[in-house]
Image (tube, helix red, strand yellow):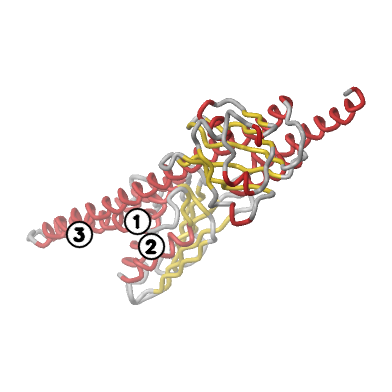
Amino acid sequence: MPERAPEALALRLRQQAILSDFGVEALRATELLPLLQRATELCAEGMEAQFCKALEYQPHQDCLLVCAGVGWAPEAIGTAIVGADLASPAGYALKTGRPVISNHLENETRFRTPKLMADHGIRRAINVLIANRDGHYGVLEVDDTRVGQFEEADIAFMQGFANLVGGAIERQRAEARLKAALERQELLSREMSHRVKNSLAVVAGFLGLQARGSDNAEVKAALADARARVDAVAQVHDQLWRQPSLEAIDVAGFLDALCDRLQESAPHHTLVCRAQPVSLPADLAIPLGLFVNELVTNAIKYAYPDGAGEIRVTVRETDAGGLVLSVCDDGVGLPEGFDPTTPRSASLGMRIVNSLARQLGGPLTVATDRPGAHFSLPIATTA
């Protein structure tokens, strides 16, 4: 035995290196079966064995399925099963949680030799449990047809592999549950936004009925304005739930769709939307949509009293990494001396615009050195 000590030490050091490398792979793995296949390959290499297999427990059949392996006939992977009862070496490891070493299967009195192993002429085997917090996943087993001895030290190496696989399974399942929860949350958010849109559409309809039933021109105008704003909120929610993602809204797609809807109500005007493909938190999408809706609606009403004209909505990134939103036209411009940022002189619509501007980051600025109305607003990129 002394002359074999250097060889044994070299083997254990090589096993530790293999196990360490596999630990990195297990942390990075996103799919289970490729990881299990890699585990069986490296485990067989570290044990200097001919065969290795990963067995997944099938509780409905109370058996173990060969889901990955090396050395076995190709048709065995994914189809071959091994008994999960206490008379099977792998079943014993599964049910008791204790590792099993059997160096002489042909003379074994504790267990029977599974058919798969008998067909391949397996003479010795070692089994360890693959477990995680969700329960027992299955068994990792190394086999060989040659005479030799699996030792207690081999259990530590194999159990290290099994523990890493079990941890990877646990992490992947947790990530899958989290993904499912997030998808459900997004579905609920979409449904909520859709229902808000429908409810607001009903409110807008009621306001329209009230306006038509009134003989007072001022009341009619006030109710019509109220209906238009309620409808604007509804349309923003309508566009919101249609976005590919509610976690981060694509500004370009969101505003393009919103402007298309506004264009339908102003066929004689030309509404141009130029927005860079940037993302904003969903919490900012609603005030952003309402801000654009209010200014575009004002331009449609007042910018070109003698005919049609162009209204431009742009979003661009700044050198500092922020965003600037602009709504511009080439119409008659703002009244002389009118400051839309001053509450006392601003109309209800402009007070709403200023309130939304503060939510988006502000401040609202108005260019006075060119024809038409030119509104600009820096936008904070975090909600």
Label 2, secondary structure: give it. helix
**Residue 98 drawn above or below residue 320:** above
The residue nearer to you, when weighing 219 against 175, is 175
Q: Which of marks 3 and 1 is nearer the N terminus?
A: 3
Q: Mark 2 points at which residue?
A: 258
Q: Nearest the camera: 18 or 174?
A: 18
Sequence-first disc among 2 and 1: 1
**Residue 167 in view of the camera:** yes
- Is 108 on the left-hand or right-hand side of 383? right
At 55% from the left and 38% from the top, the residue drawn is 169
**Total number of numbered labels?**
3
Q: Kindly identify the amino acid type of the residue bearing the numbered disc 1.
A: Val
- Which residue lies under the disc numbered 3? 224
As displayed, is residue 357 above or below residue 135? Answer: below
The Cα atoms of the two marked residues, 3 and 2, are separated by 20 Å
Q: Do the residues labelled 3 and 1 touch (CB within 8 Å)?
A: no
Residue shown at 32% from the left, 53% from the top = 349
